[in-house]
Amino acid sequence: MQGIIAEYNKINGIKEDDDTEKFKEAIVKFHKLFGMPEEEKLVNYYSCSYWKGKVPRQGWVYLSINHLCFYSFLMGREAKLVIRWVDITQLEKNATLLFPDMIKVSTRSSEHFFSVFLNISETFKLMEQLANIAMRQLLDNEGFEQDRSLPKLKKKSPKKVSALKRDLDARAKSERYRALFRLPKDEKLDGHTDCTLWTPFNKMHILGQMFVSTNYICFTSKEENLCSLIIPLREVTIVEKADSSSVLPSPLSISTKNRMTFLFANLKDRDFLVQRISDFLQQTTSKIYLGKNISGSYISSDDEVFTRSSSIISGSPHKSLSSESEGERQFNLNDNGIPTATQALMTMYRRRSPEEFNPKLAKEFLKEQAWKIHFAEYGQGVCMYRTEKTRDLVLKGIPESMRGELWLLFSGAINEMATHPGYYEDLVEKSMGKYNLATEEIERDLHRSLPEHPAFQNEMGIAALRRVLTAYAFRNPNIGYCQAMNIVTSVLLLYAKEEEAFWLLVALCERMLPDYYNTRVVGMLWGHFRK
């Protein structure tokens, strides 16, 4: 019978749903009980008790994209509750002597208590996620879109899980992954596995987890801040299965363009992992070939070795940021012929007077030497080993001469810039000459941006600042231009090239401090409401 239905659906172009039969029944019941429209999507449902007064009502809580609902029918008495996520002001997971697992849902006018969950942590996390999504939709005026790229659920799966629940779980994992390694906001986690990493700086095998996504291989140790690693696939030249031994079971070697080799071991399903990475590498090579017209080659052998041509993007950001390479793109985007800031403004306008405080220079020199020693031991560039020593050096202060390079590296902006060649140039060309409220505010604030610094007492610095701010306002009209963005961008331009300053601003506004710069001034409004 299932075969006949599948064949009928195939002939008539009917797409099969990912949801199990049990969940489909719950969807029908949800819409019937609460009178919800068909477009309202149920994410998941849980058995629980709802406290109405001092009497618990045993029933089911239904969590959909826009609503939290509860229904109970016991001994002829019906209890029904519908709350919109946007009306919820607070979610709390409480523990008391009588009820160790209880969720409190507060709205502006009432409080609701739910208890006796089989899995309270999963329920609470899903509630939080849906409430955050609803608030984001309210602020950005955008609808929820389901991710259709998730793998299909098996037809006879006994699990009571919806495609939407799987979608939200995958989103949450990808968000944690991107936040942990400062990756671009469209990067999706494919999977992760336990493993060990050989660290040459202390000659140890460190226990941790490897994460694989479409464009990156990352590692973080089980012990916090011990070691982490980010390997962009654009930097990878060889992925090779090494010979197993009792000391080093299931090892995997990954080599990069800057001649660093990383040795992972104790991988549970090494063959599948190598195949997955090889597939992603092939896709990366194709993207680079299409984007830059540089050919790549895929060589497969019995030893499961993946290699390709190099010289696409430098493995060491120090070389590409601190000096002008032969093939570097230099462009002038100002119609008036004003030079574009192809280097950090600080290097062009720094004045060293004889009376400058010498101990300060000595301190800067010592910081530079400390970083150079660190690079020699842990590697340099995006693929370097990031350890507790790296964190300590950052906290002690980054020397002025290295700020642009290291800001790009540790903010993750270097990855955005490397994967979007020519983006800033095109954006500037499209945005220059356009006039709106944002550009008016930018023009008003240009000469208020570090006016005492010589870099912004001439047209070159002012023009560079104008281009970066206008390009960003054009890229992200939801933020556009906000007060004080000019000050931050001015500082970025002092230590980074113009295109680098743009990507640092993107990282700051969209990933590191989302909603800090906002035309709605959400933080101020929230503080006002709390008072």
Image: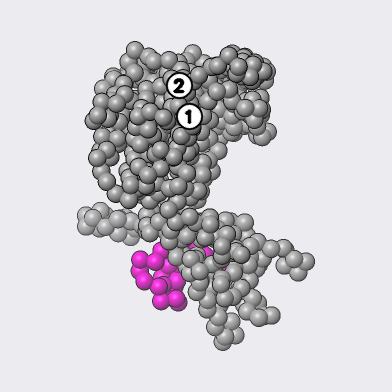
SS for callout 2 = helix
Task: Give, as a three-letter code, the residue at label 2.
Answer: Tyr
**What is the magenta range?**
25-48
Q: Quick one: label 1 or label 2, which is nearer the N terminus?
A: 2
Q: Does residue 85 appear to the left or right of 343 in the view shown?
A: right
Q: Which percent across, then down, holds residue 100?
A: 72, 63
Other-residue count near label 1 (Cα within 10 Å), few / some / many at <14 / 14–19 / ≥20: some
Residue 112 part of the magenta-drawn span: no
Which residue bears the numbered disc 1?
453
Residue pictured at 75% horizontal, 66% vertical: 96
Going by the picture, which residue comes out furthest to the bottom?
A: 76
Quarter assignment of residue 228: top right
Say what amino acid the circle numbered 1 marks. His
Q: Position of residue 381 (x, y in %)?
A: 50, 21
Q: Is 39 contained in the magenta span?
A: yes
Q: Is 399 placed left or right of 140 in the picture?
A: right
Where does label 2 land, which residue? 349
Q: Is residue 515 visible?
A: yes
Q: Nearer the viewer, residue 312 or 340?
A: 340
